[in-house]
Image (spheres, grey):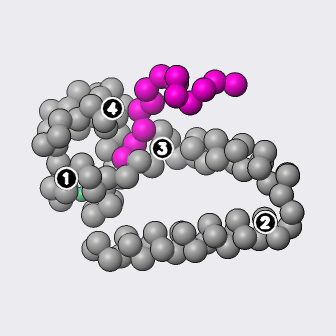
Amino acid sequence: MSDPATEVKTLDRHECRACGYVYEPKKGSSQSEIAPGTAFEELPQRWKCPVCGAPKSQFQNIGEIEGASGFKENLRYGIGVNTMTPTQKNLLIFGGLALGFLFLLSMYGLQ
Ligand SMILES: [Zn+2]
């Protein structure tokens, strides 16, 4: 098992919460002359969404590739859930749903 703190830099994709544009570090951004392989964290502070001009703070990390982060999460869940009582599992599921709902609400609120 590797310690997350010592893991090498991952090229996580970041999605603009305002317009849905996804910054892909492996591709960079041709519009703003960002070279492929530039991590989101390495983008200049003045960098803005090339589509709508939102600042970096409006972006959220959506993981390296679709599915991969979910797989990691499933692994973590798998370990935790096995030691839980059914009541705790239900709480976890409803808590997750409520969080997802709140997240959707905040997305709509920004638009
Ligand atoms: Zn945008």
> What amino acid is at disc 3?
Gly
Image quadrant assignment for residue 42: top left
The numbered dot on residue 39 is 4
> What amino acid is at disc 1?
Pro
The alpha-carbon separation of the residues under discs 1 and 4 comes to 16 Å
Residue bearing mark 2: 88
Which residue corresponds to the image point at 86% horizontal and 67% vertical from the top-left? Answer: 86
Disc 3 or 1, which lies upstream in sequence? 1
Residue bearing mark 1: 55
Disc 2 or 1, which lies upstream in sequence? 1
Is 37 situated above or below 108?
A: above
Quadrant where the image shows the N terminus: top right
Disc 3 or 4, which lies upstream in sequence? 4
The alpha-carbon separation of the residues under discs 2 and 4 comes to 37 Å
The numbered dot on residue 80 is none
In the image, the segment drawn in magenta is 1-14
Give yes or no for contact between labels 2 and 3 (Cβ–Cβ under 8 Å): no
The crowd level at tag 4 (other Cα within 10 Å; few <14, some 14-19, many 20+) is: many
Q: Nearer the viewer, mark 2 or mark 4?
A: 2
Front position in the image: 24 or 74? 74
Disc 2 or 4, which lies upstream in sequence? 4
> What amino acid is at disc 4?
Ala
Give yes or no for contact between labels 1 and 4 (Cβ–Cβ under 8 Å): no
Task: Tell me, yes or no, if residue 24 can be seen here.
Answer: yes
Residue bearing mark 3: 63
Q: Where does residue 4 sit, x and y in percent of width and height? A: 56, 30
Which residue corresponds to the image point at 27% horizontal and 64% vertical from the top-left? Answer: 18
